[in-house]
Amino acid sequence: MDVWLVEVLYGLGRIFTQPFIYMAIIMGAIVSRRRIKRERKQFGIKIFNPFAEFQGTWGTALVAGMVISVFSLIGGMVVTWPLLLLVAAVTFIVSLPLKLKWYSSVYIIGISSFVIFGLSYIPDKYQELSWISTLQSTPFSLLAVLLSVLLFVEAILMLRTTPHQSFPERIKGRRGMWIGQHRGRKLAVVPFLAFLPVGSIEPLFPWWPLLSVGGESYGLIVIPFLTGWEWVARGQSPVHASKTIGRHIFLMALVVTGVTIGGFYLPILSLAAIAIALAGRIVIYTSHRMREDRKPFFTSHYRGLRILGVLPGSPAEQMGLIPGELIERVNALPVGTENQFYEALQVNGGFNKIEVRDEWGENRYVQRALYEGEHFELGLVFVEPPTHEKSVGFFGQV
C-alpha cells in the first residue's frame, strides 16, 4: 500500500511534465483577454473576471476524473507516450482558431482515433517505426471510454448553466439596429490516473517509481485532459439554449456509452461509438443554429429597457435581475433609455423599486437599498449603448 501511495503522489507531482496543463493556462489566458477587451470596447467596463471560463467546472471535472481513475486502476487502463503526444498535438491544432468549441472531447478524441485508424494504411516501411506500432496497438475501447465520460462532463456543465454564467455581447443586427447575444463557453481540466508502461518511462525518467502489476512494471501518471465547449445564443435565452444543447449531449452520451460497452465484446463497436459521437455533435450544433435563425431575443423594446448583462456580485445580481428581462419602471417612472433609467434611480435616494417583465411576459417587482461604495448603476448593461440625449428648452435645443 505504501508503494501505491508514493506512486500516486509522484504521479500527481508529475502533472506539470505534460503540455496539457500549460495549454489550458495559455488558452484560458488568451480567450479571457480577448473577452475582456471586447467587454471594455462594447460596454466600457470589464464584466467578468479573468479566467471566468474555468469557473464552475472544477467540481464536475474532479468527479469525472475520479470515475475515469477508478476505471483505469481496476480495468488496467494503459496509456503510452506516443498516444499522449498525439492527443497533445491534436489539442494544439484545434487551439489555433481560439474557439473553445473545438476543445470538445468529441473532436480531440475523435481526430486522434481516426489518425490511429489511418496509420494502418500508410506504407509498410513506416509502420516499422516503434512509435507508429505503439500507436497502432492503442485499444479504441480506451478512447471510447474517455469520450463517454467526458461527454457527460460537457452535458452536465451545460445543464448547470445559470443566467449569470454566459458572456453578453452587443452587435449590430441585419437592419443596422443594436441587438444582443450571449456566448456560453467553458474550459475544464479533467485530471485522471492511468498506467504508463515501464518502457515508456525509463528512457525519459529513470528515477520514476514503478509498480508491478500482473508481472509487468508500470508507473502511474496523472493526465490533465482538456475539454470545453462554446455556443452563441441570439434567438433564444442563453439558459434555454444551454440546457437544450446539454440535454441533447446527455442523450448522445448515453448512446455512446451503450455502444462503448458493446465494444468490449465486439471491438469494432468502440470505433463506431467515436463515429457516432462525431456525427451526433454535428447534428446537435446544426440543430442549435437552426433554432437561432429567428427574431433576436435581446432587442430594444418600446415598453422599457432590455437587460443584456448583469455584473457578478453587483446590486442588480443581488436583486435577482436576469439577462433578458425588460425593465419597465423604476420608482414608478417609465424608462426607455439608459439616461432615464439612471435619472429614475435618483428619485428615492438610496432605496429603489424596479418593475420588470420576464421572458414569459409576467411582471414582478424587485427592490433594494443602495449603500455607499456600491455600483451606482446597479451593475447592468443594456442592449442599446447609452446615448447623450438632447432636451428642448425655451430658446431651442440645448
Image: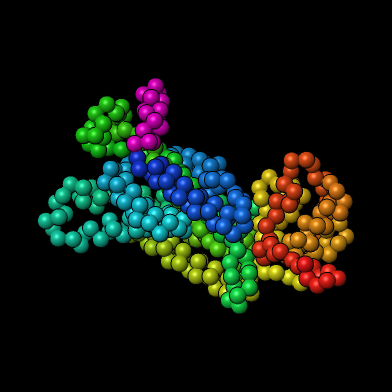
Observer-nearest of 45 and 15: 45
Task: Tell me if 300 is positioned left or right of 43 in this view.
Answer: right
Is residue 387 placed above or below 197 in the rendered structure?
below
Q: Main secondary structure of the magenta part?
A: helix
Looking at the rendered image, the quarter that the C terminus falls into is bottom right
**Is any part of residue 161 visible from this angle?**
no
**Is any part of residue 220 visible from this angle?**
yes
**In the rendering, at what x and y percent does residue 101 appear?**
46, 58
Observer-nearest of 194 and 126: 126
**In the rendering, at what x and y percent does residue 108 appear?**
38, 55
Observer-nearest of 80 and 377: 377
**In the rendering, at what x and y percent does residue 98 appear?**
43, 56
In magenta segment, residue 6: yes
**In the rendering, at what x and y percent does residue 28 appear?**
47, 48
> What residue is shown at x 31% (from left), y 51% (from top)?
89
Looking at the rendered image, the quarter that the N terminus falls into is top left
Task: Tell me if 344 is positioned left or right of 223 in this view.
Answer: right
> What residue is shown at x 75% (from left), y 48% (from top)?
376
In magenta segment, residue 117: no
Is residue 359 placed above or below 62 in the rendered structure?
below
Residue range of the region highlighted in magenta in the rendering: 1-17
- State the residue lying farthest toward the bottom: 175
> What residue is shown at x 41% (from left), y 63% (from top)?
278
